[in-house]
Image: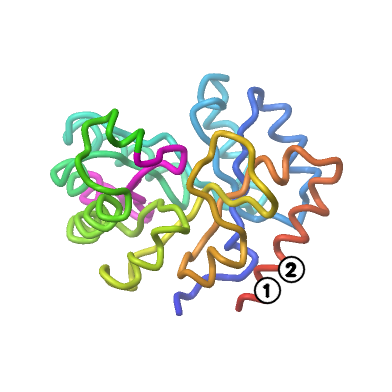
């Protein structure tokens, strides 16, 4: 088993439009969440890195979810600069050369390769021109990420059991699209908290089931309690 603190296994997706809202949520969540994912929506505020510094100063871990995808040299230089900020994870998309260049420049930052977004299903892959099923594509991309030296992948909990079967167990598996209850939003390939960890996920990313309730602290604490029973 990887050396991961149980309370760090829940990553909250801080998907809000304004930094003030983000800080308010962090303060509400208090000690129920120690790890935060910040993505493209907050990047548009112009205060992304100030928020990252604020989170780290509060002894929180930060997952930079910007899914870098460009020519390998540009991504390598970008990751090199990002590594100076103290984030824990960063996501990338792309081919072997891009992944290798990101790894060359990551320093203490852990690089996660995106396999297949949890908002996509078989029909979406057809639209994108992928002539294979989701499971095969996830396994293929995860194998290539591991060969390139990436620390982990972002993968639906539906595919994690196959990653554990076909890819080295050192690979970190971060699972988004977690839904504690029935799901009616834009996420298609979802699992619940316990299933994700029983399937072999190392971390889960939860957003709306915590954010969109009357008591986010209680919702996050309940998820933390479920995680403890899994370990």
Above-or-below relation of 198 to 115: below
Bin the neighbour count of mark 1 within 10 Å (Cα to Cα): few under 14, some 14-19, many 20 and up: few
On screen, residue 77 above or below 196: above
Q: Which residue is mark 1?
A: 228
Foreground residue among 133 and 16: 133
Residue placed at 40% from the left, 68% from the top?
161
- Check if mark 1's residue and mark 2's residue have beta carbons within 8 Å: yes
SS category of the residue bearing label 1: helix
> Measured from the top left, where is residue 216 in percent x and y?
79, 46
Image position of 207 (left or right of 30): left
Quadrant of residue 170 in the image? Answer: bottom left
Q: Residue at x 19, y 41 (%)?
A: 131
Quadrant of the rendering where the N terminus is positioned: bottom left
Over which residues does the magenta segment extend? Answer: 102-122
**Tag on residue 225?**
2
Q: Secondary structure at mark 2?
A: helix
């Amino acid at each position: 088993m990887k050396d991961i603190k149980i309370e760090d296994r829940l990553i909250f997706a801080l998907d809000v439009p304004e930094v003030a809202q983000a800080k308010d949520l962090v303060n509400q969540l208090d000690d129920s969440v120690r790890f935060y994912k910040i993505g493209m929506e907050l990047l548009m505020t112009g205060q992304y890195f100030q928020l990252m510094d604020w989170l780290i100063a509060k002894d929180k871990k930060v997952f930079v979810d910007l899914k870098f995808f460009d020519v390998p040299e540009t991504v390598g230089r970008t990751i090199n600069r990002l590594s100076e900020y103290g984030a824990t994870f960063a996501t990338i998309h792309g081919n072997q050369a891009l992944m290798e260049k990101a790894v060359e420049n990551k320093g203490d930052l852990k690089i996660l390769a995106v396999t297949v977004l949890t908002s996509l299903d078989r029909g979406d892959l057809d639209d994108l021109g992928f002539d294979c099923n989701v499971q095969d594509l996830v396994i293929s991309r995860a194998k290539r990420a591991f060969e390139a030296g990436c620390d982990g992948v972002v993968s639906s909990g539906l595919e994690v059991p196959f990653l554990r079967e076909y890819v080295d167990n050192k690979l970190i598996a971060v699972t988004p699209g977690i839904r504690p209850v029935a799901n009616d939003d834009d996420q298609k390939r979802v699992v619940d908290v316990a299933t994700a960890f029983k399937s072999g996920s190392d971390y889960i990313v939860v957003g709306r089931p915590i954010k969109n309730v009357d008591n986010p602290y209680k919702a996050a604490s309940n998820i933390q309690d479920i995680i403890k029973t899994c370990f």
